Image (tube, grey):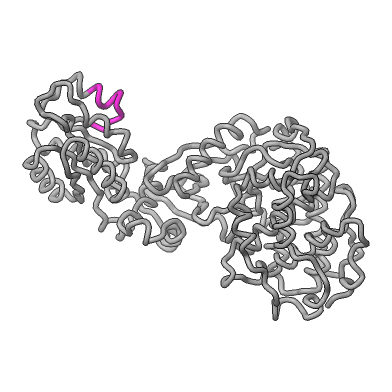
């Protein structure tokens, strides 16, 4: 275990209505190497304070007296009611009126970790506490976890010190040892340590980390640690949409999950060896291999969900994307100030041409939402179960070049084209957009908006002799062809609408003062997509947009 974890004592909540008992247990457990948190009050006030302090101090364990209301009332089992109320703290019920039957009932049916008779030897209580702590607390295990820099990065990502006490940051280590209870050592690797780092997602997910974890000498598992509500949602989505519903052997298995006070974790296993993310795969492999991988994932692994897609008519794509993302993205975007000048990123010629404002157009969409004038209203579309956040670092490639996915927080029904659009948006804004070559990126954006139907190939003749740009163009062609094959949708305008929504999302997710080249390039793409959509029947590109440099 890391040295830092040894300094952290497990936090134990003490709940008893007898002051002398509390003082005795407090002294004992502090002496035994634990940190005592004492609940105060009488009757219902004691129960209320116990729940509040369990949460405030993120207690891992609790010693709870069975009779908290009245020691002389044989029917008083108010302490048992706390067992579920203070989860994830593991409770040892203590009582001076215990029987074997009561002890068994407390553990088996009420969810207590153990039962202790007050008249028994205190050393037995210590043994019971050490046993529980050895199962759930990293500080009471000998597991070696590292490297330290990955742990520290994970902790910084997950916690805001102002909201979570620094001593409760040990939840990261506790998640890991609970997911791997028998491990002697855990070696961590961050899955997003890629050539082009994916430091934002297509959905609001600022506090999560995906790790490749090696337990002892075993093959690695994929572990996601995130805020508690995200893990709960992801576990539910996995059970509802993934387990038993994907085709073939290239399907992750949920091996376990943990829910603590602020965070949780899930552990996924894979049949084959995960080699890299799709981000790196795109750079390393020829287009033929990339195409085979994408065809296998969309055309086979995820095929059942597309085969069960539902036709919808007269639907607003704005509403459809808000169902998946929530309205937070629009609320953030409408108040965002679009950069007026991008000096050093785009030449003056780009700033001088007339173009649509993507934020103003988004506000117009909102004003007309649900009306015939809604520009996102489409006559026919399709809904299907989609991954919901298919950026290139959530698509993992194994040693046979087949694709697997992680992160099911946003998995559910949505626009059938959504996953294809999100993967393309990630390639355009993050992989291609990180480059400093403005002419190539500008031509790239003009070309991806040039089609009339989704079946039209991208116009290669618009491109200079740039191998990397041409390769990314070929990848997008593959993605769009698969979109048509899998969803039967050929309407390019609704594809571009989804791409526009994704681009606005990406352009506004980074705080304005921290915008980088790829964020600023996303604004340029958003303007181009917005102008294309708003002036759909006009020649493309506009005359004044041609030959910019």
Q: Position of residue 297 (x, y in %)?
A: 71, 42
Residue found 84% across the figure and 60% down from its top:
532
Please give left or right for residue 218 compared with residue 170 in the image.
right
Along the line of sight, the residue nearer the viewer: 336 or 244: 336
Residue 393, picture quadrant: bottom right
When the figure is inspected, residue 275 is found, relative to residue 408, above or below; the finding is below
When the figure is inspected, residue 108 is found, relative to residue 179, above or below; the finding is above
Q: Position of residue 447 (x, y in %)?
A: 85, 62
Q: How many marks?
A: 0
Residue 149, picture quadrant: bottom left
> Where does the magenta region start and end?
104-114
Residue found 8% across the figure and 42% down from its top:
19
Residue found 78% across the figure and 81% down from its top:
348
Please give left or right for residue 374 compared with residue 394 in the image.
right
Q: Position of residue 521 (x, y in %)?
A: 71, 68
Residue found 57% across the figure and 71% down from its top:
514
Q: Position of residue 103 (x, y in %)?
A: 20, 24
Along the line of sight, the residue nearer the viewer: 324 or 140: 324
Quarter of the picture containing the N terminus is bottom left
Residue 496 in view in this figure: yes
When the figure is inspected, residue 307 is found, relative to residue 440, above or below; the finding is above
Quarter of the picture containing the C terminus is bottom right
Along the line of sight, the residue nearer the viewer: 379 or 540: 379
């Amino acid at each position: 275990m890391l040295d830092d974890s040894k300094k952290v004592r497990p936090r134990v909540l003490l709940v008893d209505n007898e002051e002398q008992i509390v003082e005795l247990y407090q002294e004992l457990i502090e002496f035994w190497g634990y940190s005592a948190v004492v609940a105060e009050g009488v009757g219902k006030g004691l129960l209320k304070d116990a729940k509040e302090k369990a949460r405030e101090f993120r207690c891992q364990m609790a010693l709870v007296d069975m009779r908290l209301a009245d020691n002389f009332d044989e029917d008083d089992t108010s302490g048992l009611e706390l067992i579920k109320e203070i989860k994830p703290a593991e409770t040892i019920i203590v009582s001076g009126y215990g029987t074997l039957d009561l002890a068994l009932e407390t553990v088996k049916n009420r969810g207590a970790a153990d039962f202790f008779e007050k008249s028994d030897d205190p050393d037995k209580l210590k043994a019971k506490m050490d046993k529980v702590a050895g199962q759930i607390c990293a500080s009471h295990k000998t597991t070696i976890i590292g490297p330290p820099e990955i742990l520290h990065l994970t902790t910084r990502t997950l916690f805001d010190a102002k909201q979570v006490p620094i001593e409760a940051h040990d939840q990261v280590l506790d998640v890991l040892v609970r997911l791997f209870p028998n491990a002697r050592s855990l070696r961590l690797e961050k899955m997003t340590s890629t050539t082009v780092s994916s430091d934002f997602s297509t959905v609001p997910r600022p506090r999560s980390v995906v790790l490749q974890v090696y337990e002892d000498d075993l093959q690695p598992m994929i572990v996601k640690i995130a805020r508690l509500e995200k893990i709960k949602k992801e576990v539910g989505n996995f059970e509802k949409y993934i387990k038993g519903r994907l085709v073939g052997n290239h399907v992750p298995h949920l091996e376990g999950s943990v829910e603590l006070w602020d965070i949780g974790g899930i552990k996924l296993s894979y049949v084959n060896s995960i080699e890299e993310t799709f981000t790196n795969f795109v750079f390393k492999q020829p287009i033929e291999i990339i195409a085979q991988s994408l065809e296998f994932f969309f055309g086979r692994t995820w095929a059942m969900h597309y085969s069960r897609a539902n036709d919808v008519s007269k639907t607003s794509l704005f509403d459809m994307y808000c169902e998946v993302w929530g309205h937070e993205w629009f609320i953030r975007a409408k108040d965002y100030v679009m950069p007026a000048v991008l000096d050093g990123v785009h030449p003056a010629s780009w700033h001088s041409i007339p173009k649509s404002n993507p934020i103003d157009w988004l506000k117009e969409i909102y004003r007309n939402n649900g009306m015939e004038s809604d520009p996102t209203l489409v006559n026919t579309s399709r809904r299907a179960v989609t991954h919901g956040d298919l950026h290139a670092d959530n698509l993992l490639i194994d040693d046979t070049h087949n694709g697997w996915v992680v992160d099911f927080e946003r998995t559910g029904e949505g626009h059938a084209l959504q996953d294809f659009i999100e993967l393309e948006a990630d390639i355009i804004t993050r992989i291609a957009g990180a480059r400093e070559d403005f002419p190539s990126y500008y031509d790239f954006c003009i070309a991806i908006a040039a089609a009339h139907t989704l079946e039209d190939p991208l116009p290669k003749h618009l491109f200079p002799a740039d191998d990397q740009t041409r390769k990314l163009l070929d990848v997008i062609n593959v993605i769009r062809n698969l979109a048509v094959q899998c969803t039967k949708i050929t309407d390019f305008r609704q594809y571009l609408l989804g791409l526009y929504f994704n681009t606005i999302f990406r352009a506004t997710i980074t705080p304005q003062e921290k915008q980088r080249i790829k964020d600023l390039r996303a604004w340029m793409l958003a303007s181009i997509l917005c102008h294309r959509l708003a002036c759909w029947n006009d020649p493309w590109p506009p005359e004044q947009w041609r030959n910019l440099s």
